[in-house]
Image (spheres, rainbow, N blue to C red):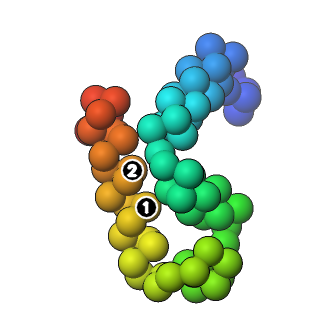
Amino acid sequence: AGLDPEPGGVVAARDLLDEVRKLLTDEERELADCRAQGLPWPEIAARVGGDPTTLRKKLGRALDRVTARLGLE
């Protein structure tokens, strides 16, 4: 078996990611996008304003909320 994911799994993962993003606020989505780009929290804080620790906790709580809502715990 190769390392390529199954097409159905890729589609399911993409659909799940779309659902997660829909349930985030615009601000939470921006934080998630910055992290997905590999930006460190101090750089994100400089970009969007705020404290790096506070922003990290905010995104963590948002993802906890979304995973609970989607029943992914």
* Position of residue 16 measured from the top left corner of the image (x, y, whole percent): 51, 28
Residue 43 locus on image (x, y percent): 65, 82
In the rendered image, which residue does mark 2 sit on?
63
What amino acid is found at the position of numbered circle 1 in the picture?
Answer: Leu
Reply above or below: 36 against 66. below
At x 64%, y 84%, the residue is: 46
Residue at far top of view: 8
> Residue at 64% of width from left, 24% of height from top?
10
Q: CA distance from mark 2 to mark 1?
A: 6 Å
How many discs appear?
Answer: 2
Mark 2, secondary structure of its residue: helix
Determine which residue is flagged by label 1.
59
Above or below, 34 against 69 in this view is below
At 47% from the left edge and 45% from the top edge, which residue is drawn? 24
- Tell whether label 1 touches label 2 (CB within 8 Å): yes
Residue 13 visible at all: no
- List x then y, in percent, for residue 71: 28, 29
Reply above or below: 71 against 37: above
